Image: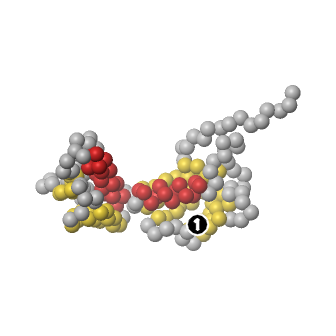
Amino acid sequence: MSRIGRMPIAVPSGVDVAIEGQDVRVTGPKGELSLTVVAPIAVQRAEDGTLSVTRPDDERESRSLHGLTRTLIANMVTGVTTGYSKSLEIVGVGYRVQPKGQGIELALGYSHPIQVDAPEGISFTVENPTRLTVTGIDKQKVGEVAANLRKLRKPDPYKGKGVRYSGEQIKRKVGKAGKK
């Protein structure tokens, strides 16, 4: 059995989970998320209020989907209760971010500023001109938006300039050596 897959999912108070066939819908104080569970995997609600994910057999595909499905549902429960956030740092002379309506405007050393609109369910918080936080209830969407922002100007290994995750360590390279 999958160690992750067989762990029960605790459902806190204020969160409603509706299971209709293969569709699981989680509603909480921050919003609503839904997931269609792949065919061999089943989700049941136990009498103590927890959710359990089961698989019918030990085939390779069933084993791989067991833990994944359990984790996706647990992430949905966490998302509608506390939400997810990713912090980004902008490093470089003249590099900055500023709020612009629902989105943000980034100056990353290009000849033009870059406008980024917030997708549905995602919000940007600009703490200062070099710090940005992406928040939302869908873990996958928050991570994807943060990765797309980082992709606009990846951290340079020589000078360290660019957009990076908070706490990310950039492996620095030594530049050219001078002539002797």
Query: Farthest right residue?
Result: 180
Quadrant, the N terminus: top left
- Circle 1 packing at 10 Å, graded few (<14), some (14-19), many (20+), is some
Query: Could you tell whether 63 is left or right of 30 in the image?
Result: left
Amino acid type shown at disc 1: Val
Query: Farthest left residue?
Result: 47
Viewer can see residue 113: yes
Viewer can see residue 28: no
Query: Farthest top residue?
Result: 180
Near-viewer residue (146 or 92): 146
How many circles with numbers are drawn on the protein? 1
Q: Residue at x 44, y 67 (%)?
A: 121
In the figure, residue 80 lies in which quadrant?
bottom left
Residue 56 % position (x, y): 18, 51
Query: Farthest bottom residue?
Result: 101
Q: Residue at x 66, y 42 (%)?
A: 157
Quadrant, the C terminus: top right
Q: How is the image coloured?
A: secondary structure
Residue beneath label 1, please? 116
Residue 111 % position (x, y): 74, 63
Near-viewer residue (85 or 142): 142
**Please, what secondary structure does the residue beneath circle 1 have?**
strand
Residue 35 % position (x, y): 31, 62
Residue 48 % position (x, y): 15, 53
